[in-house]
Amino acid sequence: MIDSTAHVRIARPSRDLAAAERFYAGGLGLAVLWRGAAHRPGEHDLLMVGPSGGGWHFELTRDPDHPVEPSPTVDDLFVVYLGAPVDEALVRRLEDAGGTRVPAHNPYWDEHGVTVADPDGYRLVLCARTWSS
């Protein structure tokens, strides 16, 4: 049985782990929890980012021998519930770190937040609502 104490890892491919790090660590402010380069065939370059001490993290991967091209859709969302209005300085920081502000596919997210595509085209939603609202 999975309960609220389970840890979560979300993994996805990236074209450029340095660009991903600039966006998620430098722009969004997540901590770099692990960074590793493939040293043997079959290994992947890895970047893990998340909140320090949190129960989840992102694992961004790149297989140097057989790169996987990211294929995000308009509904592949990473939503962060801020519980406060979205700070435009944060949006600018994400844009300066390689993100692109985009209209949401679902207008709900434009009504309650801001959507920013990361350097690989995956969408980050900064939601002004709380998880329960």
Image (spheres, rainbow, N blue to C red):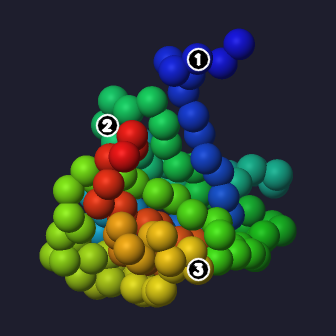
Q: Which label lies toward us, 1 or 3?
A: 3
In the picture as drawn, the residue positioned furthest to the top comes out as 1
Residue ID at (33%, 30%): 53
What is the secondary structure assignment of the residue under circle 3?
loop
Q: Nearer the viewer, residue 113 or 11?
A: 113
Kindly report the distance in space between the C-alpha atoms of the residues bearing marks 1 and 3. 31 Å
Residue type, mark 3 in image: His
Residue ID at (64%, 77%): 74
Q: Which x, y percent locates residue 30?
A: 33, 52
Q: Earlier in the sequence, mark 3 or mark 2?
A: 2
The residue where tag 3 is placed is: 105
The residue where tag 1 is placed is: 3
Instruction: Decide if residue 78 is on the left or right side of residue 52.
Output: right
Q: Which label lies toward us, 2 or 1?
A: 1
Tag on residue 48?
Answer: none
Q: Nearer the viewer, residue 131 or 124?
A: 131
Q: Earlier in the sequence, mark 2 or mark 1?
A: 1
Residue type, mark 1 in image: Asp
Q: Which x, y percent locates residue 91?
A: 27, 76
Q: Which x, y percent locates residue 36?
A: 54, 50
Residue 112 seen: yes
Q: Nearer the viewer, residue 42 or 48?
A: 48
What is the secondary structure assignment of the residue under circle 1?
loop
Tag on residue 52?
Answer: 2
Q: Nearer the viewer, residue 80 or 55?
A: 80
Tags 2 and 1 touching, CB below 8 Å:
no
Crowd class of label 3 (few under 14; some 14 to 19; many from 20; radius 10 Å): few
Kindly report the distance in space between the C-alpha atoms of the residues bearing marks 3 and 2. 31 Å
Tags 3 and 2 touching, CB below 8 Å:
no
